[in-house]
Image (spheres, rainbow, N blue to C red):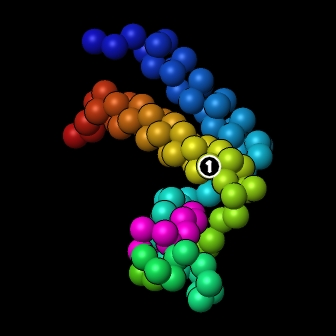
Amino acid sequence: MPNPNQSLARERAARSRLLQILRGSGLIRATWVKLNRPCGSGVCKCATAKRHWHKSWSISQSRAGKLRRKSIPNRLRDEVDGWLKQYWEARELLDLVSEEYWARLEKKPRRK
């Protein structure tokens, strides 16, 4: 049987970290998408073969059944990657807190 004090400590730690994330630099729900495409210039190498196509990165998100995508310049990739990681960490922490409350519900006696 799990120790209730350990359970409370885990929940407190998760809530504390979640607040740090929310007060931090930001978070975004999205996934990385790598794009390979030609630039359109007739004199560029990419016009001759698909293997020379330019690589770029974007993020995508499904919202209300529609996909939205935003191209991310190389100078912002590290910052956006940090936001993505913050989102996934926050999601894991919310799951942990939710599991603690599920455990509490399972412990409570039923009323007749």
Q: Which residue is mark 1?
A: 81
Closer-to-camera residue (24/15)? 24
Closer-to-camera residue (4/71)? 71
Q: Residue at x 63, y 37 (%)?
A: 18
Closer-to-camera residue (97/42)? 42
Q: Tell me how many marks there are.
A: 1
Judged left or right of residue 82, residue 29 is left
SS for dot 1? helix
Q: How far from the left and from the top, in percent, is residue 76?
A: 73, 56
Quarter of the image for the N terminus: give it. Answer: top left
Q: Identify the residue at the far left of this view.
A: 112
Give above or below for 59 relative to 80: below
The residue stretch that appears in magenta: 50-62
25 is within the stretch colored magenta: no
Question: How packed is label 1: few (under 14 Cα within 10 Å), some, or many (20 or more)?
Answer: some
Q: How far from the left and from the top, in percent, is residue 73?
A: 70, 64
Q: Main secondary structure of the magenta part?
A: strand
Q: Is residue 99 visible?
A: yes
Q: Quadrant of residue 57?
A: bottom right
Judged left or right of residue 26, residue 9 is left
Give above or below for 59 relative to 100: below
Give above or below for 32 relative to 62: above
Q: Residue at x 62, y 57 (%)?
A: 28
Q: Residue at x 39, y 10 (%)?
A: 3
Quarter of the image for the C terminus: give it. Answer: top left
Q: Residue at x 77, y 46 (%)?
A: 25
Q: Is residue 61 visible?
A: no
Give above or below for 101 relative to 83: above
Q: How far from the left and from the top, in percent, is residue 43?
A: 62, 84
Q: Amino acid at mark 1?
A: Asp
Closer-to-camera residue (61/44)? 44
